Image (spheres, helix red, strand yellow):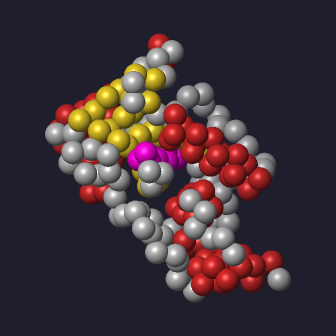
């Protein structure tokens, strides 16, 4: 039954979102992407429903879009955060990243001012890559790994035609499990449904 399938999917997803690395080490890349805010499944909509995901009415970043912050170190450990509607802020970076990154980490980002301000206040080593100027790599400093993760995430989300914003953290956990190949067999999937995930060797 459709409702039973939905309940089991979200039972699994609510557990999947907790299966995350405890922190990032070494060189870590951070970047944000934006998806349309979705009230799918809500009993009381605050705006007209969009057809199959739809499009934003305003151009650029606005409160119609939800920010997803992704941070990924060079071992592939990945953390993501739904920071809220609109553009990423310094305060959100303090809240999300500071508890999960080493103090001696090298944080590599694009030129967004919020990253510079956050790194300065947190006392972190930081290198910004000026993507708008066509500078994508500065030695070991680049954001190609996190941007590749963004691309895989966007492509994976596309068939859902808009994930309800309230469930977005669950789907991000699901994507991380798939990307990290945490589930390799039906037996592992069954155990994951019951909350038993393979042990993370890198924390």
Question: Is 106 in front, or is 95?
Answer: 106
- Can the viewer see residue 24? yes
List x then y, in percent, for residue 86: 46, 40
- Can the viewer see residue 164? no
Q: Residue at x 67, y 60 (%)?
A: 40
Left or right of 138? Residue 132 is: right
List x then y, in percent, for residue 22: 35, 64
Check residue 176 for magenta coloring: no
Left or right of 5? Residue 96 is: left
Question: Is 50 in front, or is 182?
Answer: 182
Question: Is 72 in front, or is 56?
Answer: 72
List x then y, in percent, for residue 55: 70, 39
List x then y, in percent, for residue 184: 66, 70
Is 12 situated above or below 54?
below
Is 163 situated above or below 116?
below
Q: Residue at x 46, y 34 (%)?
A: 143
Q: Residue at x 59, y 72 (%)?
A: 13
Quadrant location of the C terminus in the rendered image: bottom left
Is 88 situated above or below 198?
above
Question: Is 183 in front, or is 132?
Answer: 183
Q: Residue furthest right?
A: 1
Q: Residue at x 58, y 67 (%)?
A: 182
Check residue 70 for magenta coloring: yes
Is 154 situated above or below 18?
above
Q: How many marks?
A: 0
Quadrant location of the N terminus in the rendered image: bottom right
Most common secondary structure along the magenta stretch: strand
**Displayed quadrant of residue 202:** bottom left
Question: Which residue range is magenta in the image?
Answer: 65-74
Q: Residue furthest top?
A: 133
């Amino acid at each position: 039954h459709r409702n039973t399938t939905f309940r089991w999917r979200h039972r699994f997803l609510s557990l999947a979102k907790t299966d995350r690395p405890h922190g990032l080490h070494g060189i870590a890349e951070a970047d944000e992407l934006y998806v349309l805010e979705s009230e799918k499944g809500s009993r009381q909509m605050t705006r007209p429903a969009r057809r199959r995901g739809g499009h934003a009415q305003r151009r650029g970043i606005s409160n119609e879009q939800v920010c997803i912050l992704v941070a990924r170190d060079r071992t592939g450990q990945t953390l993501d955060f739904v920071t809220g509607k609109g553009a990423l802020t310094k305060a959100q970076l303090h809240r999300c990243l500071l508890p999960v990154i080493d103090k001696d980490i090298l944080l590599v980002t694009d030129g967004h001012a919020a990253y510079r301000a956050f790194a300065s206040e947190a006392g972190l080593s930081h290198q910004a890559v000026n993507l708008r100027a066509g500078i994508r790599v500065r030695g070991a400093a680049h954001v190609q790994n996190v941007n590749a993760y963004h691309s895989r995430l966007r492509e994976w989300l596309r068939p859902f035609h808009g994930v309800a914003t309230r469930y977005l953290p669950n789907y991000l956990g699901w994507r991380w499990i798939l990307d990290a190949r945490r589930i390799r067999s039906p037996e592992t999937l069954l155990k994951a449904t019951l909350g038993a995930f393979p042990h993370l060797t890198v924390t």
